[in-house]
């Protein structure tokens, strides 16, 4: 699955991405070490999806979309003020802040 996400990110020219399921979330970023999808790396830390985007409020896709839109418009009040969310500051917040949020891929993680 991560290979497909890396290829999609590369094809879209997207330098940062999140991959998540109901349990965990990983952050991807392009290191620009090469000119191919292989330069897109995964942050070592995995985040708990429910702690990040909330456990209630509809299907995961809706919760994520609301969270990303809130992050794009006001990341100061959206980002959890906890140490575990620090990787979001360097990769996700700069990419999302003031941006238009769109879904790059649909489908299952299997």
Image (cartoon, rainbow, N blue to C red):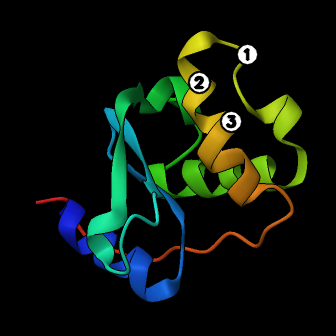
Q: Which residue is mark 1?
A: 81
Picture layout, residue 79 above or below residue 97: above
Tags 2 and 3 in contact by the CB under 8 Å rule? yes
Give the quarter of the figure containing the N terminus. bottom left
The vertical placement of 90 against 17, above or below, is above
Near-viewer residue (22 or 14): 14
Q: Is residue 39 left or right of residue 49?
A: left
Left/right of residue 95 with respect to residue 97 in the rendered view: left
Relative to 81, say whether 4 is above or below: below
The x, y position of residue 68, in whole percent, is: 67, 53
Name the residue carrying label 2: 85
- Front position among marks 2 and 3: 3
> Residue at image x 42%, y 28%?
47
Quarter holding residue 49: top left
- Circle 3 Cα neighbour tier, 10 Å, few/some/many (<14 / 14–19 / ≥20): few
- Residue extending farthest bottom: 11
Residue on which the image places disc 3:
89
Give percent across and percent down for residue 18: 46, 53
Q: Nearer the viewer, residue 89 or 25?
A: 89
């Amino acid at each position: 699955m991560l290979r497909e996400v890396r290829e999609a990110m590369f094809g879209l020219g997207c330098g940062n991405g999140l991959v998540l399921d109901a349990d965990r979330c990983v952050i991807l970023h392009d290191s620009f070490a090469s000119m191919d999808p292989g330069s897109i790396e995964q942050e070592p830390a995995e985040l708990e999806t429910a702690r990040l985007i909330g456990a209630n409020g509809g299907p995961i896709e809706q919760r994520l979309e609301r969270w990303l839109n809130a992050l794009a418009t006001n990341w100061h009040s959206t980002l959890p003020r906890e140490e575990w969310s620090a990787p979001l500051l360097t990769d996700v917040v700069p990419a999302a802040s003031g941006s238009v949020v769109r879904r790059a891929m649909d489908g299952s993680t299997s």
